[in-house]
Amino acid sequence: MNLLIDNIGELVTNTGIGEGGPLGIRRKAALLVEEGEVAWIGPARYAPAADRRIDADGRAVLPGFVDSHAHLVFAGDRGAEFAARMAGEPYTGGGIRTTVAATRAADDDRLRDTVGRLRAEAMRQGSTTIEIKSGYGLSVADEARSLRIATEFTPETTFLGAHVVPPEYADRPDDYVGLVCGPMLRAALPYAKWIDVFCERGAFDADHARAILTVGQAAGLGVRVHANQLGPGPGVQLGVELGAASVDHCTHLSDLDVDALAMSETVATLLPGAEFSTRSPYPDARRLLDAGVTVALATDCNPGSSYTSSMPFCVALAVREMGMTPAEAVWAATAGGARALRRLDAGVLRPGVPADLSILDAPSFLHLAYRPGVPLISQVLHNGVPQCQP
Ligand SMILES: [Zn+2]
């Protein structure tokens, strides 16, 4: 059983072959899906016969979004905290503990329902790959079960036991770091691909972050870091030094931070939903791009500081507020996210990769930024399987 997507007006491949530089755009194209993978891409007039056919009718097709940063395993709602911020209170990150209490009190099915609902919501908006972090359990058992549930929804799972120091360790953070590096890491390992630390004033300092990331790396996990979100700090340089796949947030960067990123393989993942939802200054994507840094966009979906699962919303914000062109933002939300997860088979459309893609209800990817807030994702294929009908 194969499937042909025919009459594609604008096909974004991210192969760099064709128009539009890195986007590798092909016009009047067709794409054949076989056994869940892209089997053929070429001019529509040469399209082969297929068992099933979708007529794209001149619309745009692009790779599925790769949301490389999301916190979906949680319980509770922090809408009141958002309202308070919009009334003028600053964001400090302290509300994470509210979600920790609600998450610990929730049973597995409740957490699973939340992850499933948000995963489906993200898919409807074109995200075919998503990273999911723990970090609202902060005990050995609750971090392990958060990751176990996350593995039911994605292979890209991240152990974030070092999100904040939980209340019962408030006056002995060194002991908590010992717990994270020992029993908690051991319990997380069967379910985690990555390790992450919230390296920020009020969370974990450079020494603690280094200790946790180093022991996680030695155990075989890939490194990612929450860095330089609320103010300048050591997180970006630490991430680069440890060979992190990605440093995330990057809102407050020194010239040395930018230089270090530009000379590394580490991706700078920008999360404009967080600045939107905390009414904070946006990161300067233009500065990073001009320096030659690889930039990704992700949602940071979480109940406190960025309760959106929408990559199109992040693309629109990045274009309007962060100095990115629509082409740069769409690349960052697809191929950039894939690089942030060190995935060669995501965020790209070429023969041999999973057929993860979106058909837009628009003639061009440009419309993702040009028509913000409009549901332009009309159909999503994940592993070649249509997820939602137009
Ligand atoms: Zn985050």
Image (tube, rainbow, N blue to C red):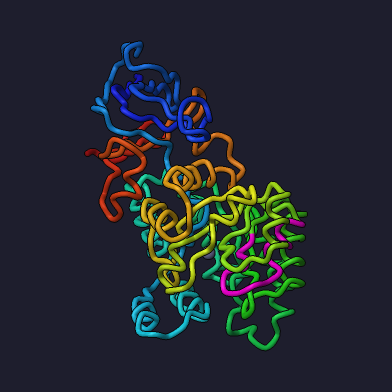
Of residues 356 and 100, the one drawn nearer to the viewer in this rendering: 356
Q: Is residue 344 visible?
A: yes
As drawn, is 241 to the left or to the right of 250? right
Q: For residue 77: magenta?
A: no
Decide: is 321 above or below 220. Answer: below
As drawn, is 51 to the left or to the right of 95? left
Q: For residue 239: magenta?
A: yes
Instruction: Check the image and name the residue furthest to the bottom.
Output: 171
As drawn, is 344 to the left or to the right of 348? right
Of residues 362 and 337, the one drawn nearer to the viewer in this rendering: 362
Task: Identify the residue shown where x is 42% and y is 63%.
Answer: 111
Decide: is 193 above or below 172. Answer: above
Of residues 242 and 256, the one drawn nearer to the viewer in this rendering: 256
Task: Identify the residue shown where x is 69% and y is 81%.
Answer: 173
Across and down, in percent, residue 58 comes to: 26, 28
Task: Identify the residue shown where x is 51% and y is 79%.
Answer: 97
Choose top left, top right, bottom left or bottom right for residue 34.
top left
Across and down, in percent, residue 115 comes to: 41, 58
Decide: is 380 above or below 266. Answer: above
The segment highlighted magenta reads: 225-241
Of residues 107 and 121, the one drawn nearer to the viewer in this rendering: 121
Q: Is residue 72 visible?
A: no
As drawn, is 314 to the left or to the right of 145? left
Q: Quadrant location of the N terminus?
A: top left
Disc tally is: 0
Across and down, in percent, residue 353 comes to: 50, 29
Q: Quadrant location of the C terminus?
A: top left
Task: Identify the residue shown where x is 24% and y is 25%.
Answer: 55
